[in-house]
Amino acid sequence: MGRLILILAALAIGGPAEAERLPMAAFTPPAGAHAPARPFEGRLILTFGPRPQGVKVLRDDDPPPDPDPRLAWPALALNVMDDGGRLIVEVPPGGGSKSWDWSAGPGRVWAAAGGDVAVLPVALREANANCVHNGLLRLTLSATGVANAQLRIGAETCLYAKFDAWAAPRVEFIAGAPADRDLRVARDRELRANQAPVQPLVALAARYPGVNLAALARASGDDQAVYGMVADGVNYAGPCPTRFGVDPFCEGRLLPSYSLAKTLVGGLGLMRLERERPGTSRRSVANLVPDCQAPYPWAEVTALDLLDMTTGRYGSDAYEADEDASDMAAFFASETRAEKLAYACGHYPRRTAPGGTWVYHTTDSYLLGEALRGAAGADPYDAVLRPIWRDLGLSPALDETRRTLDAARQPLTGWGLFLRPDDAARLGLFLSPTNRARQDELFDPKLMDEALQRSDAGARRFAAAALRPRCLGAKHRRPDRLRAAGLDAVPVRLRRDLHRPVPQWRGLLCIWRRGSLRLGPRRRRRQRRESPVS
């Protein structure tokens, strides 16, 4: 890599107020924008000083300490590759702080009077948690590198911490193409070539005249981060709102997952191992996870019981009472594998025989990840999940997941998986009935049939609700609003004792609520965690 280094002062143009005042138009490629003559490629390192220039707190459920460590942002390092004006980015591993880490998505660079402009979607993520604050980074380029940088944040996925922020960071730019540039560009081109066709949501009403878009927007609820519907293979995408306008880089918005992570990492991971190694799902937890051996009562519990959350180990069988209990904060806040194992193996007593009572436990999902490690004899995310995501053509956002922060780096399984909007559409399409043959190639057919309610056993097991993709309608809480939008609903058994109406397979509705996630060391009383709600 070439060594042209340019370091800029934070107040290069306009000072702190400049970034605050930048309208969304400043981050939006103009009509007819074209790529500059000179490619923009190299390594960017942005530092924010002791704190960003401006933070406007809209909600904070936790009294901040003084000084507040959350106001100290870590440096943002980016490898940038230019493919004809499309910017492909990589955030090298190892950055971040005790409070935050960064992610970034594909952006654009275009020629402009007074200096070419590059814009990237970026996300400030709460460390060891799911909370994502989405923003945009604007770079004004010069003949020698980068003239100034301005960042603005105005959307999030967590209810308990909402703020607007702006910054004019100090920039170091090292020009030159990264060593793996060609591989990353080729992968990005392949992803775009295979992605579902995207049309604006308004086109849905033209294609399906019975759909009421206003009612569909109401069904998504307030504070949605993204929403849309996949119908007949087309992704009808709604706008991505922020508090300073509609995000022009919606495709790069980062979406966290909670219940969906349990489905994808835990559910598909176990189904994949069952396909490769029949009998894995029936193996004892005590056999797969040595830390859960005596004196803990796990010998009679199987990996499938963990997936179904029917272990018979719980404090209360009241709806999500255990999950919302204050002592769960210790589990989420713990940073090491040993701490999480000690809690998950030993916190809940044996109440009933396994396979019966359903109790929602993220601790069960964490133990399932440990069981997958035991069954695979290797890191389950690296050895089992990542090859599936590559096979399905998912974005680099899924190349990694949240892990414990010690040397063990155990995947959390029950949360901490991040996606882009196209990933959600692709996963939903893959798990639709039209792809049954491909599903059976990758996953155990019996477990998949149960999960997608294609067998009598699946209709009788809660696994149908625990595994059915949230974007496919298994947990919609307002079917009346869907009916008002012109979408049919039918009764489907989701649990042993519960019927709920859910949409038929006319389409695939995916909604991420901006204020939907409460997860992490600072969690308080229950707020809706599931980022995808359908």
Image (cartoon, grey):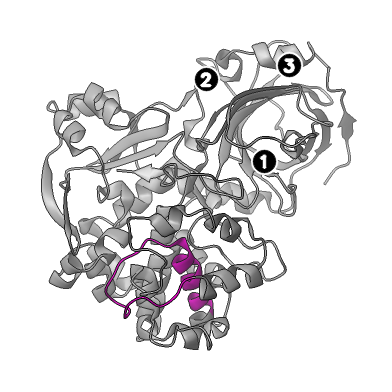
Q: Say left or right for 273 vs 249.
A: left
Q: Examine the structure image and report whether residue 364 is included in the region drawn in magenta.
A: yes
Query: Residue placed at 26% from the left, 74% from the top?
Result: 356
Q: Residues within 10 Å of mark 3 (few under 14, many from 20)?
A: some
Residue tagged 2: 243
- Residue 431: which quarter of the image? bottom left
- 508 w.r.t. 441: above or below: above
Residue type of the residue flagged with mark 1: Met
Total marks placed: 3
- Label 1 secondary element: strand
| CB under 8 Å between discs 3 and 2 | no
Q: Say left or right for 322 vs 115.
A: left
Span colored in magenta:
348-373
Name which of mark 3 and mark 1 comes first in the sequence: 1
Q: Examine the structure image and report whether residue 95 is included in the region drawn in magenta.
A: no
- Label 3 secondary element: loop
Measuring from the top left, give residue 162's x and y in whole percent: 56, 30
- Label 2 secondary element: loop
Name which of mark 1 and mark 2 comes first in the sequence: 1
Residue tagged 3: 115
Give the CA separation, mark 3 to mark 1: 19 Å
Which mark's residue is nearer the viewer, 1 or 2? 2
Q: Say left or right for 448 vs 94.
A: left
Query: Residue placed at 20% from the left, 32% from the top?
Result: 481
Rendered-image quadrant of the C terminus:
top left
Which mark's residue is nearer the viewer, 3 or 2? 2
Measuring from the top left, give residue 403's x and y in whole percent: 61, 61
Residue tagged 1: 81
Residue type of the residue flagged with mark 2: Arg
Q: Is residue 516 visible?
A: yes
Q: Which mark is residue 215?
A: none
Measuring from the top left, give residue 522's x and y in whole percent: 60, 45
